[in-house]
Image (tube, rainbow, N blue to C red):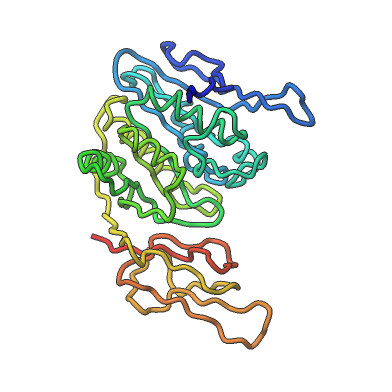
Amino acid sequence: MSTQLPASPISPTIALDAPGITHGHLHLPHSRDDSAYGAIMIPISVAVNGDGPTVLLTGGNHGDEYHGPLALTKLMNSLNISEVTGRIIAVPYMNHPAFTSAARNSPIDGANLNRVFPGSPTGGVTQKIADYLTRYLLPIADAVLDIHDGGKTLEFLPMAASHVMDNKADEARNWEAALAFGAPYVTKLVELDMLGMWDAVVEDSGTPFLSTEIAGGGTTRPSSTKITLDGVRNVLQHWGALAGDPTPSTSVVLDIPEDDAYLISDEEGLIEWLVELGDEVAKGQAVARIYNTVKLGAPPIDVPATIDGIIAMRHFPGLVKMGDAIAMQASAR
């Protein structure tokens, strides 16, 4: 019995190999109550100039993360084609339904795009987007940059991130790209859950891959926007798709332990931060305090650091639930 997948229902409205800079959409038919023959239109921009590598730039994997969409939109709006060698494909709002709803997950099917890869052409909307990226865009890419930030619920120190990999040659190659990005911090990120992630699909294909975690809180700031846009240009230069040389890296390296990196809440309530993002902490030091919002007079619960290091990520909203990651700890060098 054949296991060949059917063709994707998604089709680009522009040629992906036409010389110059072209802006268009990925057209995904989507029948809905207000439009029986409707479609989801996912913006895509392509810059092509001569022979060279194809670099795929993605943002908006989660719809409440704005640094990737903003940086890639600004890049493709201002790019001079004479700077390009090869091809740059930018999909700034890859999870467009989630982005337009300012939500992490899609409002159509409730799915988290970064947990359904490699996707399916016969699945829900989110799985169809993942499938198109996996089967149509990834195979033509020589390198991939996926830009993340903390969204509405997390705030990170601005960092470029690669991963620890079984293939050490690929790990070293991706680490060089992370350094080239030039963010204030760089790390080999320890994920809580890699299953279904774009990262894993790209890395399993052997394609050079880089990700980021830049600030968060469901907004952008001038400083973090500049870090992101400068970083995109740096890594495009590193991969040979853009003229010039990347700015020499001065990134602080963050080592994230495989165990005890994350502080997970055992309580529910109002959180009081006792330290700032980026502060140094000592093992056993209280970094946050959680107050019971139902029983006044109940003693607050302290959350202690589990290592000597710094706070590299923190929970952003003022309320915390049991099971939430309150903070990610790292050591700096």
Q: Nearer the viewer, residue 251 or 190?
A: 190
Residue 191: tell me if it is visible: yes
Residue 78: tell me if it is visible: no
Q: Position of residue 300 (x, y in %)?
A: 55, 82
Q: Residue at x 41, y 77 (%)?
A: 304
130 in relation to 84, above or below: below
Q: Which quadrant, please, contains the C terminus? A: bottom left
Task: Left or right? Give the position of 244 relative to 12.
Answer: left
User: Splitting the image into 4 quarters, where does residue 172 fall?
Assistant: top left
Q: Nearer the viewer, residue 212 or 321?
A: 321
Q: Nearer the viewer, residue 12 or 136?
A: 136
Q: Residue at x 46, y 37 (%)?
A: 71
Q: Position of residue 207 (x, y in %)?
A: 32, 32
Q: Residue at x 44, y 39 (%)?
A: 198
Q: Position of residue 124 (x, y in %)?
A: 62, 35
147 in relation to 217, above or below: above
User: Splitting the image into 4 quarters, where does residue 305 fall?
Assistant: bottom left
Q: Residue at x 35, y 52 (%)?
A: 189
Q: Count how many numbered circles sit on residues in the image.
A: 0
**Residue at the right extreme, as displayed:** 34
Task: Left or right? Give the position of 31 relative to 150.
Answer: right
**Residue at the front extreme, as displayed:** 1
Task: Left or right? Give the position of 306 relative to 274.
Answer: left
Q: Position of residue 262 (x, y in %)?
A: 41, 64
